[in-house]
Amino acid sequence: MDKGKKVILSIRGNQVDPEGKDNRIELITEGRLYKKGNVYQIEYEESAVSGMENTKTLIVVDEERIFLERTGAHESYYVFEKGRKYVNYYETPFGNLEMGIFPTRIDSSMDENQGKLDLKYQLDISGRYAGFNELMVSYQENAPQGLFES
């Protein structure tokens, strides 16, 4: 599977801000699935729906952690590992910004034909609580009707 295979992705995100307001997005798009040893990689282009046009997202899933990297117009890098807070620094026109994520749920079930990821995490900006986020990604090689219904 060196060249990867085309898959249909269903991506659902929800951000709950400190006041408890939900901001939900849902995207169905085509992506590529790669497998190298026990590591799976999912790659796809973001769209206007996610507010991140001209950005490529790469999700890498190994046995211990999940990495999420965005390149292009909206660059970011996150590491999700159970019980560990990950802090990254971003340069903005207004100065450096410290962003921390603390996962509360990391579940994945993947094979070469279909799979699911479920991430829930607290987000801190400059050490202050900025909300609770959820990211659910599912994929299937050939999506039959009704795959993404809950």
Image: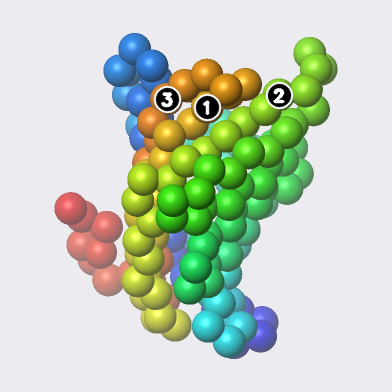
Query: Residue at the location (80% across, 17% down)?
Result: 95
Are dots 3 and 2 in contact, CB under 8 Å?
no
Which element type, helix, strand or loop, lies under badge 3?
strand
Q: Is residue 75 above or below residue 32?
A: above
Q: Residue at x 58, y 87 (%)?
A: 37
Quadrant including the N terminus = bottom right
Give coordinates of residue 74: x percent, y percent: 69, 37
- Residue drawn at x 52%, y 38% is 101
The tag earlier along the polypeptide, 2 or 1, is: 2
Q: Report whether residue 124 is seen.
A: yes
Task: Give SS at disc 2.
Answer: strand
- Do labels 3 and 1 touch, CB within 8 Å? no
- Amino acid tagged 1: Asp
Q: Specify the label residue 37 is tagged with.
A: none
Mark 1 closeness class: few <14, some 14–19, many ≥20 residues within 10 Å: some
From the viewer's perspective, tell me whether residue 54 is left or right of residue 138.
right
Precedes in sequence: disc 3 or disc 2:
2
- Say which amino acid is labelled 3: Gly
Residue 138 in picture, x, y percent from top left: 37, 61
Which residue matches tag 1? 124
Q: Nearer the viewer, residue 129 or 15?
A: 129
Indicate the secondary structure of the residue bearing disc 1.
strand
Answer with the quarter of the image where residue 118 lies. bottom left
Report the Cα–Cα distance between label 2 and label 1: 10 Å
Disc 2 marks which amino acid? Leu
The crowding category of the residue bearing disc 3, from other C-alpha atoms within 10 Å (few below 14, some 14 to 19, many at least 20), is some
What residue is disc 3 on?
131
Position of residue 120 in the picture relative to residue 51 (left or right): left
Residue linked to disc 2: 97
Q: Is residue 143 above or below residue 67?
A: below
